[in-house]
């Protein structure tokens, strides 16, 4: 695990079996694209090149189209070209030949463009809670490199990272579907099996991020696009440029009256300064956050999920990207094309869990986590609590407290964090932590400069 100094994933997996080796890179990205993060991503790529000493990566993986998973493939593309890749694995959602994928990608592009427009319009408005609403949107657009004001003149978008990955893989790019089982390139057939668990083909699961708690998000993109249009129309009207025909408003303009001209007792009461706290004039702006979260969750759910089984010991390494609830739920419904695969067993045999979405509350399905009962279970969390998205007022809750607590219990406190911020009973460098790690501590190596965290699994 390469700590990126903020939110971001970069995992190098080195397998060796029967005198052969296989090197897999899963994601290489960092949330921001600035003077600190760009050289950092380049130094990580350079370190990977050194470690491989002239050998190419056997597989390079991009789990989903967010900056914090793909930006390194842009900023350090020259190094990755020099390293080379035998195969590139992407999800079916990135396939140019899959019509369902293309339709979804088109909708996603539309929504992100609309949100950019909305953010621009909000930023131009003085008053209201416009700047707060714009901030919510820009937080999410940052994942796509589209939060323009915060960027340098050449915005880096994950789309470029994806294009670079496709170029890197040449003819060896695979767009993976759930239910696929592969041998690991570079090793003898049957040494390591790779199971593709997500993203789901079922649109309802793909778009669902929290189905167990009552739907707060629509299950299709179209209504959100419609909502974005309505929101934009509201903003345009607000700044005094009435939208022609006002298709999104319940009443024609001719029926409108300015509030201070209304004389009925209800409105007089409403306008009383003592009642300002009850006013709802600005509440419609909260929709901005919902739309932005929808886009975010939907992309996270598109994560390619891979389980690597070390066949002889049946130990499993589970890499879920940023998969959210619908993705996790879909694993139960996978058609393995006649092969017998037990999802429960894959979870029970998991000895390394790469925690989903930087340990946010809805990117690890409780019922699946509860099945990870292997006595050697270790969790790696690519979180950094110094990230401004986490430190700001009402920042993102990463790691989410209850989930983190449960992961601690299930791993017997064997958690490896990218930011090295440990509670005393988890810290592999502290006495209590060492006792908890026990014999497995010998498998952990954190470089003195904390540039890489290595964990060795014997399978
Ligand atoms: Zn992420």
Image: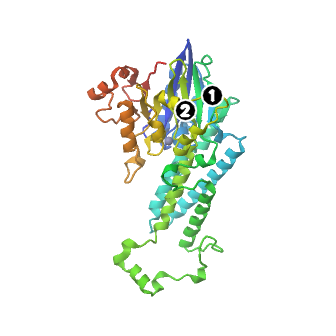
Residue at point 51%, 65% (across, down): 124
Q: Quadrant of residue 337?
A: top right
Which residue is disc 2 drawn over?
Answer: 343
* Callout 2 secondary element: helix
Q: Quadrant of residue 200?
A: top right
Residue at point 47%, 86% (across, down): 261
Q: Any atom of ligand 1 within 8 Å of the CB at mark 1? A: no
Residue 87 percent coordinates (x, y): 64, 27
* Callout 1 secondary element: strand
Residue 313 percent coordinates (x, y): 50, 19
Which residue is disc 1 drawn over?
Answer: 181
Residue at the limit of the structure toward the left, as seen here: 431
Residue 141 percent coordinates (x, y): 53, 51
Q: Is residue 7 above or below residue 59?
A: below
Q: Is residue 5 above or below residue 266?
A: above
In this rendering, the count of numbered labels is 2
Task: Report the mark closest to the observer, 2 or 1.
Answer: 2
- Binning the other alpha carbons within 10 Å of mark 1 as few (below 14), some (14 to 19) or many (20 upward) gives many
Q: Which mark is residue 268?
A: none
Residue 196 in view, yes or no:
yes
Q: Nearer the viewer, residue 229 or 240?
A: 229
In the rendered structure, which disc, 2 or 1, sits on the residue that comes first in sequence? Answer: 1
- Binning the other alpha carbons within 10 Å of mark 2 as few (below 14), some (14 to 19) or many (20 upward) gives some
Q: Nearer the viewer, residue 272 or 387?
A: 272
Q: Is residue 325 left or right of residue 424?
A: right
Residue at the limit of the structure toward the top, as seen here: 19
Residue 355 in view, yes or no:
no
């Amino acid at each position: 695990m390469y700590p990126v100094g903020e939110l971001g994933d970069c995992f190098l997996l080195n397998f060796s079996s029967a005198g052969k080796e296989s090197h897999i890179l899963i994601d290489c990205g960092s949330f921001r694209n600035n003077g600190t993060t760009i050289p950092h991503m380049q130094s990580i790529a350079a370190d990977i090149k050194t470690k491989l000493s002239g050998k190419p990566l056997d597989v390079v993986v991009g789990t989903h189209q967010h900056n914090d998973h793909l930006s390194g493939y842009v900023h350090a593309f020259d190094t990755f070209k020099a390293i080379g890749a035998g195969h590139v694995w992407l999800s079916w959602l990135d396939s140019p030949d899959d019509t369902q994928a293309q339709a979804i990608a088109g909708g996603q592009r539309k929504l992100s463009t609309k949100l950019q427009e909305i953010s621009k319009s909000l930023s131009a408005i003085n008053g209201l809670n416009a700047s707060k609403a714009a901030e919510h949107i820009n937080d999410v657009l940052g994942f796509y490199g589209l939060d323009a004001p915060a960027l340098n003149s050449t915005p880096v978008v994950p789309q470029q990272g994806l294009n670079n990955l496709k170029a890197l893989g040449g003819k060896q790019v695979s767009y993976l579907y759930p239910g696929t089982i592969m041998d690991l390139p570079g090793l003898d057939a049957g040494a390591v099996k790779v199971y593709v668990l997500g993203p789901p083909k079922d649109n309802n699961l793909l778009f669902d991020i929290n189905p167990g708690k009552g739907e707060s998000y629509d299950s299709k993109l179209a209504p959100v696009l419609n909502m974005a249009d309505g929101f934009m129309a509201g903003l345009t009207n607000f700044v005094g440029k009435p939208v022609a025909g006002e298709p999104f408003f319940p009443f024609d303009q001719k029926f409108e009256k300015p509030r201070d001209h209304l004389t009925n007792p209800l409105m007089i009461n409403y306008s009383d300064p003592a009642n300002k706290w009850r006013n709802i004039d600005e509440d419609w702006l909260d929709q901005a956050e919902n739309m932005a979260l929808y886009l975010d969750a939907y992309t996270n759910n598109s994560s390619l999920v891979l389980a690597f089984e070390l066949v002889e010991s049946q130990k499993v390494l589970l890499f879920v990207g940023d998969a959210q609830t619908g993705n996790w739920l879909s694993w139960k419904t996978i058609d393995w094309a006649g092969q017998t695969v037990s999802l429960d067993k894959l979870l029970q045999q998991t000895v390394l869990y790469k925690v989903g979405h930087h340990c946010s509350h809805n990117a690890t399905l409780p019922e699946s986590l509860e099945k990870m009962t292997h006595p050697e279970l270790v969790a790696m969390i690519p979180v950094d609590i110094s990230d401004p998205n986490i430190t700001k007022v009402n920042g993102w809750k990463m790691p989410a407290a209850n989930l983190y607590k449960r992961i601690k219990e299930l791993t017997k406190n064997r958690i490896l964090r990218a930011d090295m911020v440990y509670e005393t009973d988890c810290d592999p460098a502290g006495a209590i932590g060492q006792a908890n790690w026990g014999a497995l501590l010998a498998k952990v190596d954190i470089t003195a400069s904390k540039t890489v965290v290595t964990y060795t699994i014997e399978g």
